[in-house]
DNA sequence: GCAAATTAATGATTTATTCAAG
DNA sequence: CTTGAATAAATCATTAATTTGC
């Protein structure tokens, strides 16, 4: 009973049920995620995660948390990879040598006019609406916001229960279909205890950690993450 | 629109709406939470959080994430406090001195027969069902499980949308009213993509970090955290 | 060519750190 | 100054690659 190896599909394009204990992304999913990453998405908001998840689901089972984790891990590992590459570069440089070609340019840079210029250029099924997220970089601020932290990112635990990119009842206010770059609403959403909790001041900003790692400016929508209480 | 400050209540015992941006626990809530902590609860499961939240709501508005964060922070801060106290103790000890009374005994120790012997002994309204959680320590293992980690703690993002300690539709299987110390079901819950994802091997175990900090063995229920998609 | 053994990637959790409200 | 909230770093664990022996 060590390990059972059911006929594991070639790990690609098969939305069938994978009895695996952890998400196993398909090629397409990875491609799309990387594409988004290269476009500048680093810490997608709850809405974005919803969007992405819904789209990626077409290429295999996936949950919101998978997307969330993916970005978290990818960001962290890109950072550390770059860090050590940078170190290797300077190390090599110091060990006296004619300066080799400049250090690997920080990958997470878009600024492409608007259309993606992904380096992977894989023939990924271009999902519309997910294919090109607006780069978010232009440091969008809320008109008249106090602005402090980059993004309260409360989304970790909240996300609407709408699951796919369905028509989406825009009962709230933001179109959300194109890409809401602004907070849908500063109101509390998670509880209905009658209290209008969850502050009302939420803005976006850009923080730069400790290097060149540009954190995409994002806004937080506040949503019931990974909702879908399928009782 | 810097910040709107509607009449903020005296932050105590008033279940009324607190327009504050962050949760402001009432005395009772704190007392109960500490009581639970002293009983051994460190990283409550989603169900426990539900329970606790539901009960604490009687003493003021509160959300699941507040409980979650509270335990997280409290655990961390108790640990660091103890760490520095321990350091101070040994420091004092090394600076030659007759060994003073033994270092502060690690608070997170219950093993009280079953009833709480809390040192705070505050006249806290003993909520039944929440007042005395089973200490969880007895290292419960799943019957016939592979056992690996203490608790996948997936609960961070999942939690049923049932909000209070309502009768709770035991549609699942575990009574849950007493305290389910066993996984309700190893199946995937968050997604309904038709795939039977989220493995089927989840067990509990106890890990001991780096000291005496006993992590309560817990099982993961898998739930839509902070659900409540009040569209 | 296949399958057990090893290694490398990377998904998932936990812990530490930081920020800011009260 | 306390502490709720949020994020990033570190860690763990599982899966896929890859290697090795038959």
Image (spheres, coloured by chain):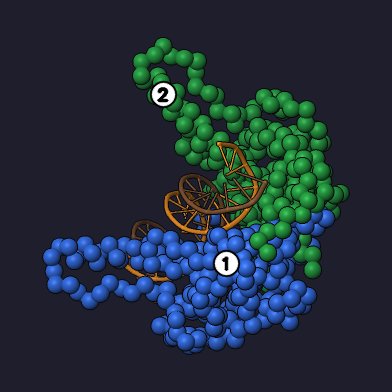
Chain colours: A blue, B green, C brown, D orange
Q: Is residue A171 above or below residue B107?
A: below
Q: Is residue A189 above or below residue A10?
A: above
Res B159 → quadrant = bottom right
Q: Residue at 70% across / 80% down in the picture?
A: A175
Whether marks 1 and 2 lie on the same chain: no
Res B92 → quadrant = top left
Q: Residue at 46% across / 77% down in the picture?
A: A38
Subunit of mark 2? B
Observer-nearest residue: A53 or A231? A53
Pointer 2 residue? B90
Pointer 1 residue? A204
Q: Residue at 36% across / 20% down in the picture?
A: B94
Quarter holding the C terminus of chain A is bottom right
Report whether residue B148 is seen.
yes
Q: Residue B190's x, y, as percent?
A: 69, 63
Q: Determine the secondary structure under disc 2.
A: helix
Q: Residue A39's x, y, as percent?
A: 48, 78
Is residue A11 shown left or right of residue A187? left
Q: Is residue A217 above or below residue B6?
A: below
Which residue extends farthest right? B167
């Amino acid at each position: 009973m060590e390990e059972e190896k059911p006929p594991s599909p070639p790990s690609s394009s098969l939305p069938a049920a994978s009895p695996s204990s952890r998400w196993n992304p398909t090629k397409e999913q990875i491609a799309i995620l990387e594409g988004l990453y290269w476009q500048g998405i680093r810490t997608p908001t709850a809405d974005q995660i919803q969007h992405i998840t819904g789209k990626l689901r077409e290429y295999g089972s996936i949950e919101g948390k998978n997307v969330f984790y993916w970005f978290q891990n990818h960001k962290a590992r890109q950072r550390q990879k770059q860090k050590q590459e940078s170190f290797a570069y300077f190390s090599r440089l110091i060990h006296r040598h004619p300066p080799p070609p400049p250090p690997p340019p920080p990958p997470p840079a878009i600024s492409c006019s608007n259309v993606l210029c992904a380096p992977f250029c894989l023939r990924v099924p271009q999902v519309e609406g997910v294919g090109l997220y607006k780069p978010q970089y232009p440091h969008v601020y809320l008109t008249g916001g106090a602005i402090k932290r980059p993004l309260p990112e409360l989304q970790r635990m909240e996300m609407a229960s709408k699951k796919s990119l369905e028509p989406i009842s825009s009962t709230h206010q933001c179109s959300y279909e194109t890409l809401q770059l602004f907070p849908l609403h500063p109101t509390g959403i998670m509880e209905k205890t009658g209290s209008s909790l969850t502050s009302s001041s939420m803005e976006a900003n850009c923080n730069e950690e400790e290097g060149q790692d540009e954190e995409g400016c994002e806004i937080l929508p506040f949503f019931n993450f990974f909702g879908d209480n399928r009782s």
